[in-house]
Image: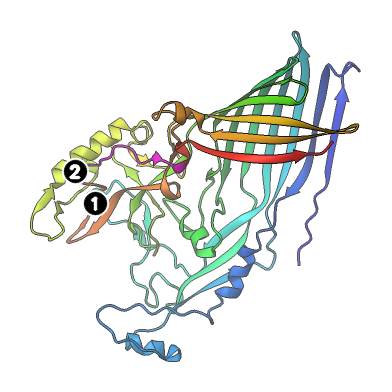
Amino acid sequence: KQLLWSPRVGFNYDVRGDRSAIVRGGIGVFTGRVPFVWISNQFSNNGLLLNTISITGNRPFIADPNNQAAVGGTASRTFEVNLIDKNFKFPQVFRANLATDFKLPGGILATFEGIYSKTINNVFYQDVNLAPAVGVVDPAYNNGFDKRIAFSSSTNAGGRRINPDITNAILLKNTSEGYSYNLTAQFSKTWRNVFASVAYNHNDAAEPNSGTSSTALSNWEFVQVVGDPNNPPLATSNYALTHRITSVISTNFSYAKYFKTSVSLFYEGMSGRRFTYLVNGDLNSDGRFGNDLLYVPKNQSEIKFVDRLNSAGTAIVSTAAEQAAAFDVYINNDKYLSSRRGTYTERNGSTTPWEHVIDARIAQDFAIVTGKTRHALQLTFDIFNLTNLLNRDWGRQYGVSNQAYNLLTTINRTSGAFQGKGYNFTPGEPWSPSFSSRFQGQVGIRYIFN
C-alpha cells in the first residue's frame, strides 16, 4: 500500500489594487485519475490462466480444453507473466505555474501564463525475461553502418529468453524521468453584444513511456528504441503539441421581447500530431515487431534492398535498384528524414501537417414568461468543421495509425536486406485524413430555468 500526498499552495496578487494588473501562480503535486487496469494486468497474466502453444503445419482439433498441449505434439507450452514492483506508485507530477492578467488600453484583457511539470512517478515497463544483447544487428542490412545492438534469435535456454518457458515477464515500476511545459498568451475583449478572444500555446513534453495502452505487453513493446528496449531514453511524448492557436468570436442579439439569437465561431490551428518512422520486422531480435527505429542512410551504399516479386513469386515487380533509388528520393522529399541522414529516427520525431478548423454554433432562445418568472427554451445547431462544409479541400485533419509508420520491411533470405513499403514508396505521405476531416452537425434542445 502506497500513500500519495498532494500538497499545493497558490497566490493571487492585485498589484495596483484595482484589478488592472494581477499576478497569480502556485506549486503543488498532482495525481490524475487512477488507471486501475495497469494493476489488473498482474491478476490476469499470472502464468496460470493462459498458455500459448506455437506450432506450424496441420494439426487436429482437440475439443478438450485441458488437453490442448497435445495439439502441439512435443512443442512446449509458454506463457506471459505480468509483475509489479512492490513500491510502485501511481503517476504524479510536481507542477508550478505563474501568470499575469493585464487590462490594456481599449478594454483588452491580456493573459500570459507558463506551466512547468516535472515527473515524480510515471510508469516504466521492462521485460525481465529478456537476456542481454549478444552483438549488433546483421551488418548486411546497412552494409555495417547500422550498429544497433541485437539479441539472440534463439528462444531456448541460453538464448533471448532467460526462462524459455516464459514469453515475456513484464515488470511495472516507476521512473522519475519526464517533463512538460506550456507557454500561453491570450487576448480577449468584450463589447456590448460581442466577445472575441485569440490565444497561442507552445508546448513540449518528454518521457520514457507515454503509457498509451491498457495492457503491460503493449506498453513495453510499442516504445520505439534503437538500443535496449528495457531502458528507453527520454523522448518526445505522444501527447506533445508544439503550436496551437485558438480563437473565438461570439455575438448575440435580443429582439421582439421574447427571442434571442446567438452565433459563435471557434477556430483551432495546430501543428501536426507526432509520429515515428519505423522498420517493419524484428530487426534487433528482441522478440517484438514494431519497435525498431529506422536508420536513415547517408546514400544508397548504406542500405541493401532485394527484388520485390509478385504474389506468385514468379516475376520481379520492382528491382532492388529501383527501390533504392525511390527510397533515396523519398528521404530527400521528407524534411525530417533528410535531416537524419547517417543516424536514426527518433520516437515521435516527425509530425503531420498543420491543421486549420472552424466550428460554429447557432443558438435560438425562446423566452417563456409565467407571472414574474422568466424561463427559456433553447434550440442549438452545432457544425463541426465548418471549413470542410465550405470547401471539401479545407479542414483536413491528419493521423498516422498508432502514431507509427513502417517505412521498410526486413527480408531474411541468404543475407539481411530490406524491401520498400509499396512498390515505389507511394503514396508519398505516411498520414491520411481522419474521420474528423468531414463536416458534421448536431442539434440540441435545452430548457433554462430562471
Residues 46 and 441: in front is: 441
* Magenta residue span: 423-435
Residues 103 and 223: in front is: 103
The residue located at (73%, 25%) in the rendering is: 259
Please identify the residue farthest to the top as the structure is shown: 105
So how many labels did they put on this image?
2
Element class at badge 1: strand
Q: Position of residue 185 (x, y in %)?
A: 66, 23
Q: Quadrant of the N terminus?
A: bottom right
Residues 437 and 212: in front is: 437
- How dense is the environment of label 2, judged by Cα within 10 Å: few (below 14), some, or many (20 and up)? many
Q: Position of residue 296 (x, y in %)?
A: 32, 41
Left or right for 238, reference 337? right
Do the residues under discs 2 and 1 have CB atoms within 8 angstroms? yes
Left or right for 239, reference 196? left
Left or right for 203, reference 272? right
- Reply yes or no: does residue 165 show up in magenta: no
Element class at badge 2: helix
The residue located at (14%, 47%) in the rendering is: 318
- In which quarter of the view is residue 46 placed? bottom right
Which mark sits nearer the N-terminus, 2 or 1? 2
The residue located at (53%, 81%) in the rendering is: 49
Amino acid under label 2? Answer: Gln
Residue 352, compared with residue 290, is above or below; it is above
Q: Position of residue 372 (x, y in %)?
A: 91, 31
Residue identified by numbered label 1:
418
Residue identified by numbered label 2:
323
Please identify the residue farthest to the front as the structure is shown: 371
